[in-house]
Image (spheres, helix red, strand yellow):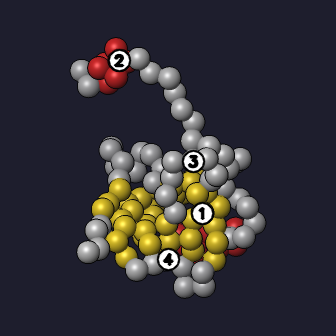
Amino acid sequence: MLRAHGLASCPQYTAPITQGTLDDWGWALHVEPCAGSCYDGFYFSGPIADELRPYAGLGVSVRLYGTGFCGTVEGCALQPVGYDFQNPCGPTAVLRSSWGRVKAIYR
């Protein structure tokens, strides 16, 4: 059985869906997540892929914003709405948090 799920940020497009380096698959670009990060890999095509194609294979780290979904034959797909460059490519930053800080977020 094929399971599918979607990814988004709230408020919409305020956090990157993924960050990594780009590979050119010909018909689409693929984001290879940074080593040690918590991000997933995604493929995408369209106008933003055309803009980013010159950076594929160069090791440039890019953050992509948009909506992602998994469950396709090729893996997880992304509908990007924006991007920015983030160097270096590395592990996801972790902030130490207390229970009081977590509760304050939801007040």
Real-space Cα distance between discs 2 and 4? 41 Å
Using a 10 Å C-alpha cutoff, classify the residue at mark 1 as few (fewer than 14 neighbours), some (14 to 19) or many (20 or more): many
Instruction: Please identify, in this view, whether the residue under mark 3 or under mark 4 is nearer the observer.
Output: 3
Residue 88 visible here: yes
| Picture coordinates of residue 91, whole percent (x, y) | 62, 43
Q: Residue at x 24, y 21 (%)?
A: 107
| Picture coordinates of residue 100, whole percent (x, y) | 34, 14
Question: Where is mark 1, residue-wise?
Answer: 32
Q: Which mark is residue 37?
A: 3
Q: What is the three-letter code of the residue carrying label 4?
A: Ser
Left or right for 59, reference 7:
right
Q: Which mark is residue 99?
A: 2
Q: What is the three-letter code of the residue carrying label 1?
A: Glu
Pointers 1 and 3 in contact (CB under 8 A)? no
Q: Does label 3 or label 2 sit earlier along the sequence?
A: 3
Q: Residue at x 41, y 17 (%)?
A: 98
Residue at the far top: name it.
100
Q: Which mark is residue 45?
A: 4
